[in-house]
């Protein structure tokens, strides 16, 4: 589990570092801030669902479907809720490019989580 968390955090931060300079060149400091906030917002629910998946009672086949659907719901609700709250309450985030960054990091962390969960499932089997 610790290794999965380390991989999740390092990969997400690695993507952010990789995209930082193009984001800054494309839209200035504002885009760099949007990308960092989007990475952080997407990292929180993905970490929670990864922790949920590592519990021992989620190893049964019927629990895997609950984990998949519940994890997706938790992640999507959290990311969209925080993104909407920032968009509506903080004028700084009222740009459409903020939503683009949320989408980029949402899809990246989703794919990474699925990869990590599939890798852990193969090890358990």
Image: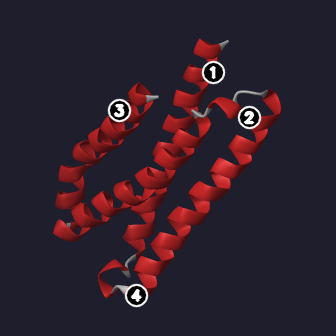
Question: Is residue 42 positioned above or below 55 on the image?
Answer: below
Residue 96's spot in the image, x, y percent?
42, 74
Q: Which residue is mark 4?
A: 89
Res 121 label? 1
The answer to whether the residues at label 4 and label 1 have Cβ atoms under 8 Å apart is: no
Q: Quadrant of residue 64?
A: top right
Q: Quadrant of residue 13?
A: top left
Q: Residue at x 42, y 50 (%)?
A: 43
Cα separation, mark 2 vs mark 3, equals 22 Å
Give the side of residue 65 with respect to residue 88, left or right: right
**Which secondary structure, mark 3?**
helix
Point out the image quarter for the C terminus: top right
Residue 88's spot in the image, x, y percent?
45, 86
**Which secondary structure, mark 4?**
helix
Give the side of residue 111 with respect to residue 12, left or right: right
Give the side of residue 111 with respect to residue 124, left or right: left
- Label 2 CA crowd tier, 10 Å (few <14, some 14–19, many 20+): some
- The first of marks 2 and 4 along the sequence is 2
- The first of marks 1 and 2 along the sequence is 2
Q: Which residue is mark 3?
A: 6
- Residue pushed farthest right? 62
The answer to whether the residues at label 1 and label 2 have Cβ atoms under 8 Å apart is: yes
Kindly report which numbered mark, 3 or 4, lies closer to the viewer in this rendering.
3
Question: Is residue 21 positioned above or below 89 on the image?
Answer: above
Q: Which residue is mark 2?
A: 64
- The first of marks 4 and 1 along the sequence is 4
Residue 4's spot in the image, x, y percent?
44, 29
Cα separation, mark 1 vs mark 3, equals 17 Å
Question: Is residue 53 positioned above or below 102 on the image?
Answer: above
- The first of marks 2 and 3 along the sequence is 3
Q: Residue at x 17, y 67 (%)?
A: 29
Q: Is residue 66 visible?
A: yes
């Amino acid at each position: 589990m610790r290794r999965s968390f380390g991989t999740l955090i390092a990969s997400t931060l690695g993507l952010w570092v990789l995209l930082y300079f193009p984001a800054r060149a494309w839209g200035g400091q504002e885009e760099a801030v949007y990308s960092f906030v989007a990475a952080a917002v997407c990292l929180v629910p993905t970490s929670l669902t990864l922790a949920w998946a590592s519990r021992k009672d989620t190893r049964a086949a019927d629990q895997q479907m609950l984990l998949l659907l519940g994890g997706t719901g938790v992640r999507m609700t959290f990311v969209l809720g925080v993104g909407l709250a920032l968009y509506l309450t903080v004028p700084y985030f009222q740009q459409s490019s903020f939503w683009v960054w949320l989408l980029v990091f949402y899809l990246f962390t989703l794919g990474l989580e699925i990869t990590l969960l599939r890798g852990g499932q193969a090890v358990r089997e």
